[in-house]
């Protein structure tokens, strides 16, 4: 267990229970989720209606599903501008691209092109199938980067998106050494990287919509993967973040994941973002001078 003193794993693995905001509401855990959905959707709308940011709606997969990617830019963006790729969370079963664009504005204003990925949710697919879908997305995004001739790519994933992003380390046929040379940073935000404790929890995986069993949960846990070629990633910085107001279980998953990566030979750092919970760490990426936005700008050398 990531918190041996835990008496309630269902609560530990449900981040909304650990916010210190909305304590004046009858159900703070529901209020923080509702606030997140409403605010992030509005932040996404404001990009094109108020901030002069343009968007291309593109596809990386099938024609009738959620394998889509929105690419944001403005009039000063060039083909060679650096590319920032974001993967949203939602426990592989919630959220969509309209609630996943908070991070876009400050980065586009600082010269970045930003790609926000969406994906099919469970139970439309199993988590095992979703990881293959993400591998296909990686192939698409690298091909896109080659088309626009950018030589600088950064990736970030939040929550379940952080778990999915780890697949970039497990797809050598797609993430070739040549493609790897263009990656500058990988940013893992508030993720889960070991599924063995959570896959059987009803509030995380109701009616097993993720399609897991004990064996598959272990196989899909990046904390347990082997990383024999880690030293070939030595020019890429790995940033693993947790939020202060999450459960100790969530924080320790991030801490241990960073330790696994470091032991394997990846250049890593770990940071607990003080004052943040699982939700406002994303909400505030939309604010140019917020602590999390400045932290991202420091990572990107902006």
Image: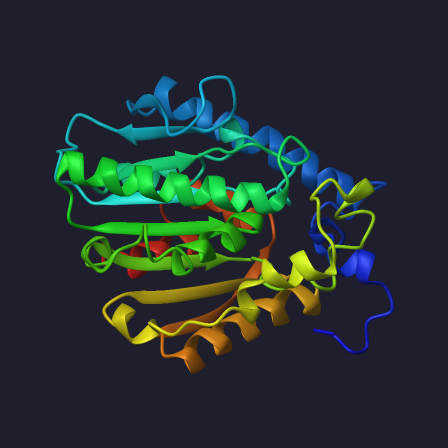
Q: Position of residue 241 (x, y in %)?
A: 49, 63
Q: Looking at the rendering, which quadrant does residue 136 occupy?
A: top left
Note whether 184 is above or below 161 in the view shown.
Answer: below
Which colour scheme appears in the figure? rainbow
Q: Is residue 203 left or right of residue 61?
A: right
Residue 203 placement, left or right of 83: right
Assign the C terminus to one quadrant of the image: bottom left
In this rendering, is residue 282 above or below 248?
Answer: above
Q: Foreground residue, 219 or 263?
A: 219
Residue occupying image coordinates x 51% and y 68%: 225
Give the quarter of the image for residue 169: bottom left
In this orientation, which residue lies closer to the viewer: 299 or 79? 79
> On the rendered structure, is 65 left or right of 200?
left
Q: Quadrant of the N terminus?
A: bottom right
Q: How many marks?
A: 0
Residue 285 screen position, x and y as percent: 44, 45
Residue at figure coordinates x 45%, y 37% from the top left: 102
């Amino acid at each position: 267990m990531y918190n041996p003193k835990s008496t309630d794993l269902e609560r530990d693995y449900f981040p909304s229970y650990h916010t210190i905001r909305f304590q004046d509401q009858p159900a703070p855990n529901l209020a923080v989720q509702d606030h997140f959905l409403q605010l992030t959707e509005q932040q996404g709308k404001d990009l094109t209606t108020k901030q002069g940011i343009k968007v291309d709606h593109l596809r990386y997969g099938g024609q009738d599903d959620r394998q889509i990617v929105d690419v944001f830019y403005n009039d000063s963006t060039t083909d060679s501008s650096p590319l920032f790729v974001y993967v949203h969370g939602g426990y592989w079963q919630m959220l969509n691209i309209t609630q996943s664009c908070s991070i876009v504005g400050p980065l586009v204003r600082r010269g970045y092109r930003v790609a926000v990925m969406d994906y099919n949710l469970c139970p439309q697919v199993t988590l095992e199938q979703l990881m293959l879908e993400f591998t296909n997305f990686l192939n698409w995004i690298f091909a896109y980067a080659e088309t626009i001739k950018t030589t600088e790519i950064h990736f970030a994933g939040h929550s379940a998106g952080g778990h999915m992003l780890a697949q970039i380390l497990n797809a050598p046929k797609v993430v070739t050494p040549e493609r790897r040379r263009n990656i500058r940073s990988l940013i893992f935000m508030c993720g889960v990287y070991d599924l063995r404790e959570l896959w059987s929890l009803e509030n995380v995986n109701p009616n097993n919509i993720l399609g897991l069993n004990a064996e598959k949960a272990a196989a899909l846990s990046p904390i347990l993967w082997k990383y024999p070629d880690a030293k070939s990633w030595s020019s890429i910085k790995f940033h693993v973040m947790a939020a202060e107001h999450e459960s100790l279980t969530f924080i320790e998953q991030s801490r241990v994941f960073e330790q696994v990566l470091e032991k394997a030979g990846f250049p890593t750092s770990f940071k607990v973002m003080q004052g943040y919970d699982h939700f406002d760490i994303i909400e505030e990426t939309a604010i140019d001078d917020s602590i999390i936005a400045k932290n991202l700008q420091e990572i990107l050398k902006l």
